[in-house]
Image (cartoon, grey):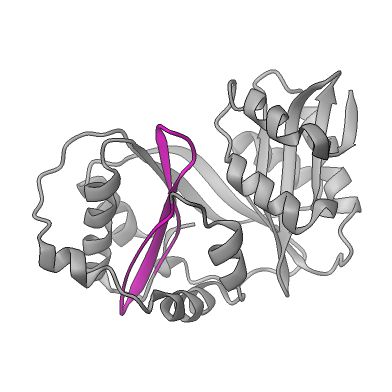
Amino acid sequence: MFIGWLRKASLKEDLKKLSESVLIDENLILNSFEEDQSLCFGAYEGEDLKAVITAYSFKDSILINNLCYTEDTDTEVIKRVLKVLMNNMADTSQTILFMANIKESKIFAKLGFKKYARFKKAVHSGEAVAFNFSNATAKSITRPNYLGTIKKLDFDALNEDRYDYITEICSKVSSLTLSTEFGYQHSYAINKNHIKISPWIMVDEAFTDAEKLIRGVLYHRGLKTIISIIPSDIKEITDLYKSYKFELKSDLYLVYLNKKPNINLASVYGF
């Protein structure tokens, strides 16, 4: 098995084939690759891409934003892909972050990562929810100056300037951005059947506005499977999702290496 740089010439085709066996965010992988190829690696079995890892470097931190692999990928291969990425990071003092499932958290722990917070995968599978969504509500969450809201509130919540990442790397043709004075929500299509809410940030205790935004995404996207990663220990957030028929599934952990991050989890309605 070859583990190293992603093969640029065949990357789109390789990802499309990989997506047949595992849910991957092709757009996020490709945008991350175009931004910085030195933080993108893969594991190949012959000509087949079996695992892919990508990351994005901010001022003070590096976010590993993709770690995808086929079901039969050995744990040791995942560990080797991660080590290749870490060995190619220019600034080893930056905080490194990753949202890991239970299996992955054990691999990351062996390389020195610590758990910061527990999260859950919230999944809405199209179950009907009765709620009012008037034209007035629609107008109240569609603001032309939402970019300023993103820049300020996201920094306040995560203590990192992620503006370019959100508006360029995460953004795609299918993006839907809803916002009020007290929060913003970005959602987009992973594929024709799956929508991901990422990111979604609110001011503390802006519960009324948060409910408007979850109604908005369900109104526009409710016929598809909607996925969001949410902090599992913030009752107001988990209760909101459950009240709109989201099922809280897989346990996840935000893990970190080096300096401990400073995140206001109560503002993170979708990571």
Query: Who's the residue at 86% across and 58% down the image?
Result: 89
Q: Quadrant of residue 107?
A: top right
Give the percent coordinates (x, y) of residue 8.
Answer: 81, 40
Query: Who's the residue at 84% across and 69% down the image?
Result: 93
Task: Indicate whether 30 appears above or below 139.
Answer: above
Along the horizontal axis of the image, is 214 left or right of 259?
left
Q: Is residue 120 magenta?
A: no
Give the percent coordinates (x, y) of residue 179.
Answer: 33, 69
In this rendered view, identify the residue nearer to me: 89 or 241. 89
Query: Who's the residue at 36% across and 76% down the image?
Result: 203
Give the percent coordinates (x, y) of residue 115.
Answer: 63, 54
Count up the numbered dots.
Answer: 0
- First to last magenta residue range: 175-201
Q: Main secondary structure of the magenta part?
A: strand
Query: Who's the residue at 75% across and 35% down the image?
Result: 11
Q: Quadrant of residue 195?
A: top left
Task: Indicate whether 46 appears above or below 89.
Answer: above
Along the horizontal axis of the image, is 30 left or right of 46?
left
Give the percent coordinates (x, y) of residue 44.
Answer: 83, 26
In this rendered view, identify the residue nearer to me: 236 or 171. 171
Task: Indicate whether 26 appears above or below 143.
Answer: above
Along the horizontal axis of the image, is 89 left or right of 205?
right
Along the horizontal axis of the image, is 74 left or right of 226?
right
Task: Indicate whether 169 appears above or below 94.
Answer: above
